[in-house]
Amino acid sequence: MICSYLLVCVGNKHNSSVRAGLSSRTTSLEDPVVTAPGQYVTAEIASQPETWSRAVDLAAQVADRLPRTGERVAFVGCGTSWFVSQVLASWREAAGLGESDAFTATETPLRRSYDRIVTITRSGTTTEVIELLEQVKGRTPTVSLTADLNTPIVDAADEVIDLSFADETSVVQTRFATTALMLFRRQLGLVPDGIVDACRAAVEADLPERHVDAEQISFLGRGWSIGIANEAALKFRETSSSWAESYSAMEYRHGPISIAQPGRLTWVFGEAPAGLADQVAATGAEFVDHDLDPLVDLVLAQRVAVARALKLGGNPDEPRNLTRSVVLSS
Amino acid sequence: MICSYLLVCVGNKHNSSVRAGLSSRTTSLEDPVVTAPGQYVTAEIASQPETWSRAVDLAAQVADRLPRTGERVAFVGCGTSWFVSQVLASWREAAGLGESDAFTATETPLRRSYDRIVTITRSGTTTEVIELLEQVKGRTPTVSLTADLNTPIVDAADEVIDLSFADETSVVQTRFATTALMLFRRQLGLVPDGIVDACRAAVEADLPERHVDAEQISFLGRGWSIGIANEAALKFRETSSSWAESYSAMEYRHGPISIAQPGRLTWVFGEAPAGLADQVAATGAEFVDHDLDPLVDLVLAQRVAVARALKLGGNPDEPRNLTRSVVLSS
């Protein structure tokens, strides 16, 4: 479908309701809403140990809606949900469960034949995802993860998995994304022991001021942690309008390392390629390697991004130029 | 193969020989080499009308080494060659000639079955590419484009296509990449009329100072021009150590637009999504849409990157932290 697009903003929920952390309270539209900068995203980041636990518990209940072993699957999303898709596809294929690709909705090769399409849309309204699902309806089985069942996704997808317990007031995604990952991670049998406790420690850890102050960060990963690196970089751009990049860790030496210098960080998710730490050190940049599960390490990156936004005087709950969902009307 | 890597630098050819533009001259190692900053990359960029013409002429001669219609093909490269691979895969699949994926060598899913693997390595020495080819030898037919036949690629790949007429003295790739693209573009029947003349015009066009001075550039594309956008951003990082990003144009509204602001550019290769120009204008950033073939537009981006490096007092022939080829020894 080719449309002439106009952008219709689905506004930040601040305007109509207040939901902080995991609790909900009902307010009238007339309520004065006074918020501290970053209060929503901060509470949502802090709630991840709880939402991850709930996702792990949920996995068995929704197993019949998830891809079967051997199927060829496309995971599709936009923005953060694209990077979630990258992680899911990498996990599934590496586990030998079937070929798995990840695409942003508008770049999904519809000429190809997939056995199932899994979409991820927190808002349930993302135009490109809805249009993709309409195009494959009746042809390819689809399932979507969403945080809002009162949206077009419910009709557009054949099946829906409800992650509304991980919905967010924030424009930027944190817990919805990581919770969706934990749901599949459990289903794939890939949840490491103690990860919820590790997440709790990451939520409470002190953050080095020099990371918050870094002029630039390059996030690196390998395999599934490339998607984590992409998400960390997007979080920095969205939350603090900062310069952040992301790459395959093995690609970094093929060009992007050229920007490394003192005052900048090269942050590796998961195992770093041998030799890279020394090569980065030679540029004067700091090599950050926390030796944590990449999903737990992402929580630290989320927190550094928010801390940086606050230090720069911004409000990470109100990222520039962004709305909670991109809805395009033809 | 899992190795413990050490980096061995394959140095900039400046150290041992001088080759500028399309001409070669033999020098002894003792010759004093006096170069103006950026003289190599400038000459190589300017030579693209000639190397593109040669690639078009060459296509028919090497047709028997290129993928057959219907084959499932993986295009593989590192750095700029990865982005060349992205463009080739997109062209081929969109033309209905068979499923086509692009990977950086270390992230190629070897569990999958491809009918043919096409690798691109200017130097012929890139460790990750050589190792990949060794792993699939005798199992999957392979062909590699290279600019140097006196290298390990000749034994590692089943077939080689010689693009040494487009080799470069520069560390950063310009004409080798675009010439490799033109070879396949001709083979796929996708060469637009007049493109060599358009390239010549791009080589000679005046560059707006405000583009050279831009604090940051986000390059966007759709379909095959996403690979072009990725290459343009890499060129900026490598050549001038500048802040440049790249995305799918339809992804840009899902987060990355948050960094757009006055003094920054959003540069679209190929057709821009409707409505995006106005949305970018609202951020104060300049929307750059040249209405050129994306490959021709890339020539302008190469030139802006070099002009920026020179204006900042750098030497784009000597990018920081980089070598002409990344050779890792186990």
Image: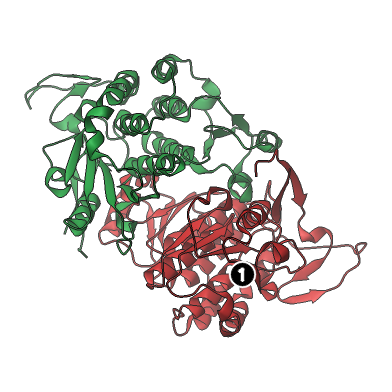
Chain colours: A green, B red
**Does A72 appear above or below A1?**
above
- The residue under the point 88% across, 69% down is B27
Determine whether, in the image, residue A165 is placed left or right of residue B248: left
Q: Note whether residue B209 is visible.
A: no
- Which residue is tagged 1? B175
Q: Chain of mark 1?
A: B
Badge count: 1
Q: Amino acid at mark 1?
A: Arg
**Does A165 appear above or below A280?**
above
Q: Note whether residue A204 is visible.
A: yes
Viewer-closest of B260 and B111: B111
Estimate the x, y position of residue B25 in percent, counting from the top left.
83, 74
**Does A259 appear above or below B17?**
above
Determine whether, in the image, residue B182 is placed left or right of residue A131: right
Determine whether, in the image, residue A159 is placed left or right of residue B232: left
Quarter of the rendering occupied by the N terminus of chain B: top right
Mark 1 crowd level (few <14, some 14–19, many ≥20, 10 Å Cα): many
- The residue under the point 52% across, 62% down is B75
**Does A262 appear above or below B150?**
above
- Write down the quadrant of residue B78 in the picture: bottom right
Quarter of the rendering occupied by the C terminus of chain B: top right
Estimate the x, y position of residue A306 in percent, counting from the top left.
39, 27
Viewer-closest of B164 and B107: B107
